[in-house]
Image: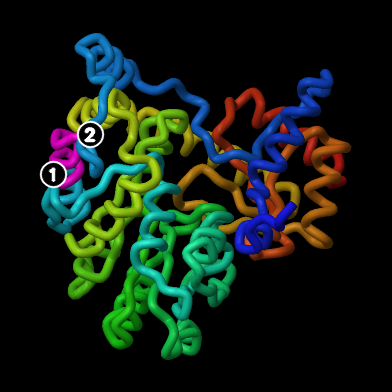
């Protein structure tokens, strides 16, 4: 038989999914594994959102609709960013996608050419580089500066004649850190000075503790060159709904729409009505989840510090990112096999020597997991 795609052959699978699948297999074998490897809220989707979807099904919202999304959701997203994120883009500058990951993939396909390079800030979420490479472009890695995981002037040296885009993720997966105003302004300056695009992944914007979130597109001169990525999975516990979105100038959205028309056609019609309810409905559910995550965050970070570990700032998202001496892959295997706690090694994020631990789990599970980690740390 003829060989399969070389492009896909050279793309690594998702390390987070691989570890989660291993943990699930162990659980099916009767082993009491606590999985802290996936970034998924353990809450149910709020009832008013679920009800909106059910009502849409009952009234027959089960057919094709506009590729970019139903008008009601496009309008709700446009109003949301104007109200909350301090920049203004109209419904024609929005596209609804099958999850934020789909929005990132469509962005790369719409913006990049094979001769282009994209700067990715390490540690970085596992799917940025594969999405760039699927679009045929190349990645240039820039390491954020520890211990705060911020940007310094060294990023200027990453820019060359082939650079076309910078990818930022704040709050960050995996570190939980939030880019400071100084870091964001450095991104702004190199984008404007070198005529670059920026992809700003803000999926964790609602999960911020002891500080505030700033959208890159709200900075002067950035609205036309920023593609803002967001979605419903984290803030509204809607991971399985596969509902995300992107905002950008109309020219970029038009190209992304071409990708969507020839791939998924459009997101699930009745699911989008849940998105409308999420943005236009009561927001106390988001606040309650954030409060619970903050309680877990303070508990987990305190326990890890007591054990002698160094942690990233953890001002956002729902991750504790901890420095572990030795080979991080071996340590992750040790924790899984000996402590029956599944975490994700920093190597999966281009950042060896660290572990990402998700505290999107009950306090009961987190308490047991900390006890198990402490036992094998001693």
For this view, does 314 lie left or right of residue 270?
right
Residue at the disc numbered 2: 279
- Which sits in the foreground, 328 or 196? 196
The location of residue 261, given as percent across then percent down, is 31, 46
User: Can the viewer see residue 97 in this picture?
Assistant: yes
The location of residue 369, given as percent across then percent down, is 72, 33
Q: Where 156 falls versus 298 (above or below)?
A: below
For this view, does 124 lie left or right of residue 111?
right
Would you say residue 256 sits in the magenta stretch?
no
Q: Where 118 falls versus 261 (above or below)?
A: below
Residue at the disc numbered 1: 79
Q: Which secondary structure is most common in the magenta stretch?
A: helix
For this view, does 196 lie left or right of residue 359?
left
Asked whether the residues under the numbered discs 1 and 2 touch, taking CB atoms below 8 Å apart as contact, a structural biologist would say: yes
- The residue at 80%/61% (across/down) is 325
Pick whichever of labels 1 and 2 is earlier in the sequence. 1
Give the extent of the magenta segment.
Answer: 70-79
- The residue at 29%/51% (across/down) is 246
- The residue at 47%/75% (across/down) is 114
- The residue at 84%/53% (across/down) is 330
Q: Circle 1 sits in a helix, a strand or a loop, which is it?
A: helix
Local packing at callout 2 (Cα closer than 10 Å; few below 14, some 14-19, many 20+) is some
Quadrant in the rendering for residue 99: top left
The location of residue 250, given as percent across then percent down, is 17, 60
């Amino acid at each position: 038989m003829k060989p399969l795609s070389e492009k896909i052959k050279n793309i690594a699978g998702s390390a987070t999914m691989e570890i989660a699948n291993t943990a699930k297999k162990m659980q099916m074998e009767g082993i009491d594994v606590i999985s802290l490897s996936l970034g998924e809220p353990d809450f149910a989707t709020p009832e008013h959102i679920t009800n909106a979807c059910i009502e849409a099904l009952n009234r027959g919202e089960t057919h094709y609709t506009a590729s970019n999304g139903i008008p009601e959701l496009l309008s709700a997203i446009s109003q949301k960013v104007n109200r909350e994120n301090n920049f203004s883009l109209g419904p024609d500058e929005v596209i609804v996608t099958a999850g934020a990951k789909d929005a990132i993939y469509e962005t790369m396909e719409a913006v990049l050419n094979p001769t282009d390079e994209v700067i990715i800030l390490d540690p970085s979420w596992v799917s940025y580089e594969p999405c760039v490479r699927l679009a045929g472009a190349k990645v240039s890695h820039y390491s954020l500066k520890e211990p705060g995981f911020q940007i310094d002037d060294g990023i200027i040296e990453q820019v060359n004649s082939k650079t076309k885009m910078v990818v930022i993720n704040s709050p960050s997966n995996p570190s939980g850190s939030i880019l400071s105003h100084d870091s964001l302004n450095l991104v702004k300056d190199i984008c404007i000075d070198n005529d670059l695009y920026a992809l700003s992944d803000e999926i964790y914007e609602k999960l911020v503790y002891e500080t505030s979130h700033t959208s890159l597109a709200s900075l002067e001169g950035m609205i036309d060159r920023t593609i803002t990525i967001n979605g419903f999975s984290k803030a509204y516990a809607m991971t399985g709904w596969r509902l995300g979105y992107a905002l950008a100038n109309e020219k970029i959205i038009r190209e992304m729409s071409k990708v969507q028309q020839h791939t998924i056609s459009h997101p699930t019609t009745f699911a989008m009505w849940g998105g409308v309810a999420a943005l236009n409905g009561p927001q106390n559910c988001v606040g309650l989840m954030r409060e619970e995550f903050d309680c877990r965050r303070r508990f987990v970070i305190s326990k890890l510090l007591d054990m002698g570990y160094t942690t990233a700032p953890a001002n956002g998202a729902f991750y504790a990112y901890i420095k572990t001496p030795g080979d991080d892959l071996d340590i992750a295997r040790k924790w899984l096999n000996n402590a029956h706690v599944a975490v994700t090694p920093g190597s999966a994020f281009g950042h060896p020597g660290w572990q990402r631990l998700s505290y999107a789990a009950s306090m009961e599970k987190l308490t047991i997991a900390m006890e198990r980690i402490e036992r094998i740390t001693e």
